[in-house]
Image (spheres, helix red, strand yellow):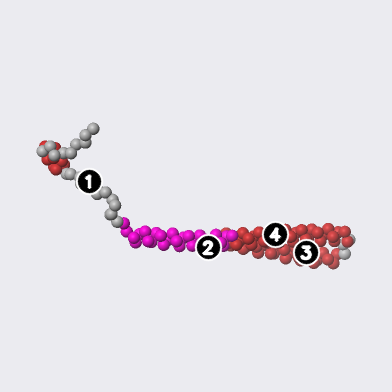
């Protein structure tokens, strides 16, 4: 979406520069004084330079966005591969301590009555 906005911005800048070129061509036939022409030429050059700078900045921003999108796509593909490997890899019981067996109420009562219950000494 950001690329679309940037492209429309570039098209708008191009149209503006074309309009300013059309305006300068129409002003040539008015017969202005030489000092006014110099001032107009300086203003036009400044506008063109600013327009070129804006276009250059916009192009650089578009390039950065494209690079960022490519990097994000590669990272996303890598993440997807890792998730697939993790889900297909399963898990191993090795290295885990065995869970203690829980006695039923009847078994516990028998151990208490026969004094086989392991007590914790303090």
Nearest the viewer among 111 and 43 is 111
- In the image, taking residue 41 as reference, residue 62 lies left or right, namely left
Residue 1 appears in the picture as rendered = no
Which quadrant is the N terminus positioned in? bottom right
Q: CA distance from mark 2 to mark 1?
A: 51 Å
Q: Circle 2 is placed at which residue position?
A: 70
Q: Name the front one of labels 3 and 2.
A: 2
Dot 4 or dot 2, earlier in sequence? 4
Q: CA distance from mark 4 to mark 1?
A: 73 Å
Q: CA distance from mark 3 to mark 2?
A: 41 Å
Residue 38 appears in the picture as rendered = yes
Instruction: Tell me if residue 84 is in the magenta stretch.
Output: yes
Instruction: Tell me if residue 8 is in the magenta stretch.
Output: no
Q: Circle 4 is placed at which residue position?
A: 53
Residue 108, by quadrant, is top left
Q: Circle 3 is placed at which residue position?
A: 23
Q: Secondary structure at mark 3?
A: helix
How many residues crowd mark 2 within 10 Å: few (<14), some (14–19), many (20+)?
Answer: few
Please say if the residues under marks 4 and 3 sit with CB atoms less than 8 Å apart: no
Please say if the residues under marks 4 and 2 sit with CB atoms less than 8 Å apart: no
Please say if the residues under marks 2 and 1 sit with CB atoms less than 8 Å apart: no
Q: Which residue is depicted at the point 53% across and 63% down?
A: 70
Q: Tell me residue 60's x, y (percent).
A: 63, 60
Nearest the viewer among 52 and 99 is 99
Please say if the residues under marks 1 and 3 sit with CB atoms less than 8 Å apart: no
Q: Which residue is depicted at the point 45% across and 62% down?
A: 77
């Amino acid at each position: 979406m950001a690329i679309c906005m940037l492209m429309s911005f570039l098209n708008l800048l191009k149209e503006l520069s074309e309009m300013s070129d059309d305006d300068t061509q129409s002003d040539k036939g008015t017969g202005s004084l030489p000092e006014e022409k110099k001032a107009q030429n300086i203003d036009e050059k400044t506008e063109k330079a600013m327009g070129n700078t804006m276009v250059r900045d916009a192009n650089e921003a578009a390039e950065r966005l494209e690079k960022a999108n490519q990097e994000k796509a590669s990272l996303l593909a890598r993440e997807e591969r890792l998730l697939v490997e993790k889900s297909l890899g399963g898990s191993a019981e090795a290295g885990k301590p065995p869970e203690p067996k829980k006695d039923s109420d009847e078994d516990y009562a028998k151990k208490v009555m026969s004094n086989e219950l392991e007590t914790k000494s303090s």
